[in-house]
Image (tube, rainbow, N blue to C red):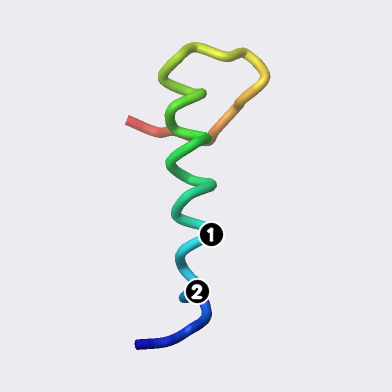
């Protein structure tokens, strides 16, 4: 196993946090969500 974090680890965590904030309804977080 790699002793260092994989390149996608941090971006994925950031994406999860941003999605949580977006779902929570924070007006500060504006994501280009297109449904």
| Element marked by disc 2 | loop
Q: Which residue is mark 1?
A: 10
- Crowding near the residue tagged with mark 1, few <14, some 14–19, many ≥20 C-alpha atoms within 10 Å: few
Eye-nearest disc, 1 or 2: 2
Image quarter for residue 26?
Answer: top right
Please indicate whether residue 35 sits to the left or right of residue 24 in the image. left
Q: Nearer the viewer, residue 1 or 33?
A: 1
Reply above or below: 9 against 15. below
Reply above or below: 33 against 23. below
Please indicate whether residue 18 sits to the left or right of residue 28 in the image. left
| Element marked by disc 1 | helix
| Residue at point 42%, 87% (across, down) | 2
Q: Are marks 1 and 2 in contact (CB under 8 Å)?
A: yes
Reply above or below: 21 against 33. above
| Residue at point 61%, 25% (across, down) | 29
| Residue at point 60%, 27% (across, down) | 30
**Tag 2 or tag 1, which sits nearer the N-term?**
2
Q: In which quadrant of the rendered image does the N terminus lie?
A: bottom left
Image quarter for residue 23?
Answer: top left
Q: Position of residue 21 (x, y in %)?
A: 51, 24
Q: In which quadrant of the rendered image does the C terminus lie?
A: top left
Q: Which residue is mark 2?
A: 5
Q: Position of residue 13 (x, y in %)?
A: 47, 50
């Amino acid at each position: 196993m790699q002793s260092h974090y994989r390149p996608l680890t941090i971006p994925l965590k950031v994406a999860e946090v941003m999605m949580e904030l977006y779902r929570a309804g924070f007006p500060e977080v504006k994501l280009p969500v297109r449904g």
